[in-house]
């Protein structure tokens, strides 16, 4: 009886050992063989998957300076908020906005920002790109009023236009198809002394920027000078530089008027 019991225990032990070896061998096979010949079950998301655009969504990437940030609007909407209000009357698409604008940003700083991977991702997935840049290059936080002369401002414009060319080229290389709306400059100092000179300088920068934009596919330079030319103080925030809610509403509606929809998307 004792011998019989030992035999049964031995058989069970041998079976358990074989079962362990089989399982261990299966794990080794999975790690050493299948791991080399097959994709891992946990896969990284293909970048192209995240870039696919939905026909039911309108994706907007916004970048630039404090105007795109909405500084001065007590309601916090900025021109992008009023733009969205106008677009909702034209389309049933859901409107998604990524706003990467930075208060006080200059054209050279924007060039650096465009090199970031997150900025590139936002631009790649965009149907529409909104841009404000140039105000800080031109007005320099109001310091420009201390040295107003055409020679000085022409010298300041040269590097700005070179930077703007890089900005346009970079945006177009990242996303060749999205329509870019570059919101132009207005003159917040039109009611101050030397208003004719400041207006002449702003018009020159606008004109040269628009000419540069015309060299690129689907980059539209949107004029705003005329919106603030009459009764400028009615449309400025208390800092007398940024637009207030009424001023941003004018800009948002101006840009929205240029965006039309068809069955294939935006135009």
Image: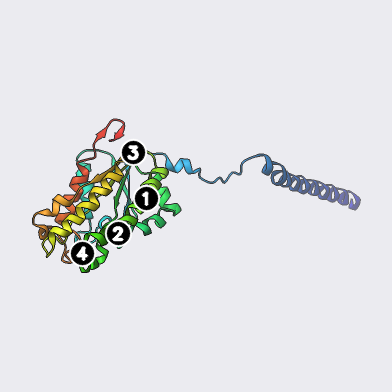
**Residue at (69%, 44%) from the top-left corner?**
30
Give the mark, 1 or 3, whose residue is nearer the N terminus: 1
**Residue at (41%, 57%) from the top-left corner?**
112
Q: Is residue 246 left or right of residue 214?
A: left
Give the mark, 2 or 1, whose residue is nearer the N terminus: 2
Q: Is there CB contact under 8 Å for labels 2 and 3?
A: no
Please tell me whether mark 2 sits on a helix, a strand or a loop: helix
Q: Answer few, some or many: residues within 10 Å of disc 4's Cα (few below 14, many 20 plus, some between 14 and 19).
A: some
The Cα atoms of the two marked residues, 4 and 3, are separated by: 35 Å
Q: Answer few, some or many: residues within 10 Å of disc 3's Cα (few below 14, many 20 plus, some between 14 and 19).
A: some
Residue under label 1, please give it.
Answer: 167
Q: Is there CB contact under 8 Å for labels 2 and 4?
A: no
Residue 111 falls in image quadrant? bottom left
Which label belongs to residue 148?
4
Please tell me whether mark 3 sits on a helix, a strand or a loop: loop
The Cα atoms of the two marked residues, 4 and 1, are separated by: 27 Å
Q: Position of residue 203 (x, y in %)?
A: 19, 52
Q: Answer few, some or many: residues within 10 Å of disc 2's Cα (few below 14, many 20 plus, some between 14 and 19).
A: few
Q: Position of residue 144 (x, y in %)?
A: 23, 65
- Which marked residue is nearer to the observer: mark 2 or mark 3? 2
Give the mark, 4 or 3, whose residue is nearer the N terminus: 4
- Which marked residue is nearer to the observer: mark 2 or mark 1? 2
Residue under label 2, please give it.
Answer: 155
Residue under label 3, please give it.
Answer: 217
**Residue that sits furthest to the top in the current view:** 263
- Which marked residue is nearer to the observer: mark 4 or mark 3? 4
Q: Answer few, some or many: residues within 10 Å of disc 1's Cα (few below 14, many 20 plus, some between 14 and 19).
A: some
**Residue that sits furthest to the left in the current view:** 231
């Amino acid at each position: 009886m004792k011998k019989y019991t030992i035999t049964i225990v031995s058989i069970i032990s041998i079976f358990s050992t074989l079962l362990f070896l089989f399982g261990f061998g299966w794990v080794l096979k999975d790690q050493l063989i299948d791991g080399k010949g097959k994709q891992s079950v946990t896969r990284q998301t293909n970048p192209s998957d995240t870039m696919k655009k939905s026909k039911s969504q309108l994706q907007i990437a916004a970048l630039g300076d404090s105007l795109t940030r909405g500084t001065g609007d007590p309601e916090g909407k900025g021109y992008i908020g009023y733009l969205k209000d106008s677009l909702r009357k034209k389309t049933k698409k859901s409107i998604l906005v990524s706003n990467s604008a930075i208060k006080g940003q200059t054209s050279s700083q924007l060039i650096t920002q465009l090199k970031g991977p997150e900025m590139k991702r936002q631009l790649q997935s965009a149907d529409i790109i909104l841009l404000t840049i140039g105000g800080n290059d031109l007005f320099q936080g109001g310091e420009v009023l201390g040295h107003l002369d055409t020679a000085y401002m022409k010298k300041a414009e040269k590097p700005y236009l070179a930077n703007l060319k890089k900005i346009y080229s970079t945006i177009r290389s990242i996303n060749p198809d999205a329509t870019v709306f570059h919101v132009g400059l207005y003159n917040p100092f039109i009611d101050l002394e030397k208003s004719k000179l400041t207006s002449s300088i702003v018009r020159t920068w606008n004109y040269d920027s628009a000419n540069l934009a015309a060299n690129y596919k689907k980059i539209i330079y949107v004029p705003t000078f005329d919106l603030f030319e009459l009764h400028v103080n009615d449309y400025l925030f208390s800092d007398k530089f940024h637009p207030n809610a009424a001023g941003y509403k004018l800009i948002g509606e101006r840009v929205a008027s240029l965006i039309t929809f068809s069955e294939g998307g935006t135009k």
